[in-house]
Each structure stands twice: as C-alpha cells, then as structure tokens.
Image (spheres, grey):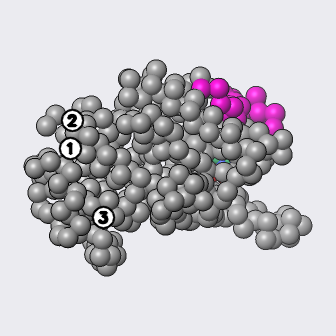
Amino acid sequence: MLATELFSRRSETKRNDFYTIATLGSHSALQILKGAHDEGFNTLAIASRETERLYRSFAFVDEVIIIDRYSDFMLLVPELEQRKVVIVPHGSFVAYLSLDDHRRMNVPYFGNKAVLEWEASRELQRQWLTRAGLTLPRQFTTGAEIDRPVIVKLYGAQGGKGYLFLRNAQDFEMRAGELARQNYILQEYIIGVPAYIHYFYSPLTGKLEIMSMDRRYETNVDSLGRIPAAAQENMNIEPSYVVVGNSPLVLRESMLAEAYRMGEDVIRVSQEICGPKGLFGAFCIETIITSEAKFYIMEISARIVAGTNPFIDGSPYSYLNYSEPMSTGRRIAREIKNALLSNNLDAVLDDSYVA
Ligand code: AMP
Ligand code: AMP
C-alpha cells in the first residue's frame, strides 16, 4: 500500500502494519510521541518500572515496553529489528547508551550517527564549531595558565552536575588535589546570559528553521542571587549547574540573524566532516550572550533537546513557519512522514541501517 493511502486511512483507526515511532521514556519522549501521534504514527515508549504508569497515562502513547534500566535498551533491539519502527533519539540515548551501542542497533534511526563522534569528543566538537566561525570560550590546559574565572567541566558529567566554578589560579591550586584523579577541561567562565537555540534542518528541503529557544533553570546557580552576597560570604556555597527545568525565551530580533547564521554554518561544516548528509533534524546551540551582544558557544547537542519541552504546543518561531502547533517532536515526525510520502525514508535515517 502506498504511504499516502496509509496516512489518509489512519485518521480513523491505528494500523498495526504502519510505522511506529519509538523512543526511551524520559527527556522529551512525551513531546516526540505526541508529535508522532499527531502526524499519524503509532507510538511506543520504552519505559522503566518507575515511569511506566506515567507514560501509560497519556492517550497518545499506544504502547509501553518496560525495561529494568535504560541501559538495557540494547536487549530490546532484536525485537525492534523485527518491527516497522523508527527510533527518535534524545538526550537520554547519549546519556545511557554508548557510541558502540548506537552503532550496533540495526533499527531505522532518525539522524546521522556519524555526528555522535564529533559531538562526544570535546576536542572534535571544538574543531567543528571553530571551523563554523563560532566563538568559543577560551580553554586552559594547566591551572597555572588561568588568568580569569573558569568553569571546570568533568568528563562524563551530566547536566552540569559536578562542574566547578573557580575564580582564579589560586582557587585551582586549592582544588588541585581533588582534581588530580579526574579528566576535565578548564573553560573560561563567560559572564552573560545563557540562551539555548533550537533548530531543525530538513534534509528533504535543505532548509534550516529556528524552532524555539529556552533558558535553563539550574540548581543552585539560579538561586544564588536570592541570597545577598554579604550573607553568602561565610556560607561556603559552591555553585552547581544541575538542570531541573526550562523556560521559554525569545531573542531580541536584531540578534536573530546571527543565531540563524550560526545554525547554517554548523550544518555546512557538518556536511564536510560527517559525510554528505552531515547533521540533520533537530539540534541545539548552547550559548552565553555577553553584554556586547556576543554569542559564546558552550556546546552543541546534535538532536532534540529537552529545552524544546515548553513548546509542545509550538513556539512563537514555529508559529511563524507553520501557523499551527508545531513542536520539535512533531516537526521530526512530519519530516519522517514527508520522507515516507516521497518514498525517500532513507534520506532521514542513519545510513548504517540495512533493511
Ligand atoms: P535524563 O533522562 O533526565 O537523565 O536526561 C538525559 C540527559 O538529558 C542528561 O544529560 C540530562 O542532563 C539532559 N536533560 C534532561 N532533561 C533536561 C532538561 N530539562 N534541560 C536540559 N537538559 C536536560
Ligand atoms: P553544559 O553542560 O555545557 O550544558 O553546561 C551546563 C551549565 O553550566 C550551563 O547551562 C551554564 O549555566 C554553565 N556553563 C557552562 N559553560 C559555561 C561557561 N563557559 N561560562 C559560564 N557558564 C557556563
């Protein structure tokens, strides 16, 4: 049956022989599965015992499979390989599965796995972003070089947990003992406001869209301003950067052109370094904007980020493009649908998949 017929018939009933969009029950799964449902797909949440009831409570989740731990996802792969499933990866996939796990799963996978290596290595990521003309915070290789405030980023730290703020080289000296056994980078601390810009690049049309933006709510750094500096003096509070949620943001419009350019350049360079498909689908550039309105880039996330969650009903930017509720999750499902309708599903899947 033609994909067009499948989509038109589906408005009435769900069809078992049609594609299912599957993801791990965490991070941005609700948004992804709601978007998939709204675009006419079957939906599957792979959840843990603790999260199962939550995912079952939503009518747009057609099926829930339970695993003990998210890292057990690979045990399910043989079953998924037998089904018509497209996996939409999000932050929990990179947090709980290894690069090797990603490579080993022969399941249709939305996105280009080659990008993972460039993203996972801080050095490669730096090369990629610098080549795209983006400005990155300075990096120091030894404590002695530190001549300004720095943030110490431990390797493998998730969601800003375990980051340290150091004012100067003396601070570093005092912490040198505890840092000696760890792998970390020393990055210039940029004073400004964090802004996370969410993009979608369509491999089908070659068009880049700004989908939305967020700012993160991080504990405890976002509450330190609530305690007067004088009162903090003897309290020995260490700032930490553990994300607990996100709130919407719109950018001053005169800064939008630069945000768009950064997205375009990141895509262009990705096509030079990660094979011709490069980076496609959803991605996020994590920035800090200084008082000179300059964007410093902390990181890139090469897939949907949880900062898109405030926009399940669409954002001001996605409204400009669609005039209907268009979350990033739904945009992904629409791309998969458009690919199916033009008989070109491969264009939106990682190339390693063999049917
Ligand atoms: P989780 O499944 O919640 O442990 O998240 C997996 C990864 O995504 C972790 O690295 C988290 O730090 C990151 N993450 C989860 N939720 C958010 C959020 N709301 N904003 C930013 N990052 C997040
Ligand atoms: P990341 O793990 O890179 O997303 O960083 C987590 C949080 O640490 C960010 O949301 C910022 O609040 C903070 N952060 C990271 N890098 C820097 C930096 N170079 N300057 C200032 N704050 C930073």
Label 2 residue near ligand 1, CB within 8 Å: no
User: How many residues crowd around disc 3 within 10 Å: few (fewer than 14), some, or many (20 or more)?
Assistant: many
Q: Is residue 199 left or right of residue 217?
A: left
Q: Residue 199: x, y in percent? A: 52, 45
The Cα–Cα distance between marks 3 and 1, rounded to whole angstroms, is 20 Å
Which is more N-terminal, label 2 or label 3?
A: 3
The answer to whether the residues at label 1 and label 2 have Cβ atoms under 8 Å apart is: yes
Amino acid on which the number 3 mark rests in the picture:
His
Q: Residue 256: x, y in percent? A: 68, 44
Residue at 51% across, 26% down: 268
Q: Is residue 116 left or right of residue 190?
A: left
Q: List the residue tagged with mark 2.
A: 353
User: How many residues crowd around disc 2 within 10 Å: few (fewer than 14), some, or many (20 or more)?
Assistant: some
Q: List the residue tagged with mark 3.
A: 37
Q: How many marks?
A: 3
Q: Quadrant of the C terminus?
A: top left
Residue, far right: 230
Residue 260 lies, with reference to residue 333, above or below; the image says: above
The answer to whether the residues at label 3 and label 1 have Cβ atoms under 8 Å apart is: no
Residues shaded magenta: 132-152
Q: Secondary structure at mark 1?
A: loop
Q: Is residue 151 magenta?
A: yes
Q: Residue 5: x, y in percent? A: 17, 54
Q: Secondary structure at mark 2?
A: loop
> Which quarter of the figure has residue 20?
bottom left
Marks 3, 2: nearer the viewer: 3
Q: Residue 72: x, y in percent? A: 24, 55
Disc number at residue 107?
1
Q: Is residue 239 magenta?
A: no
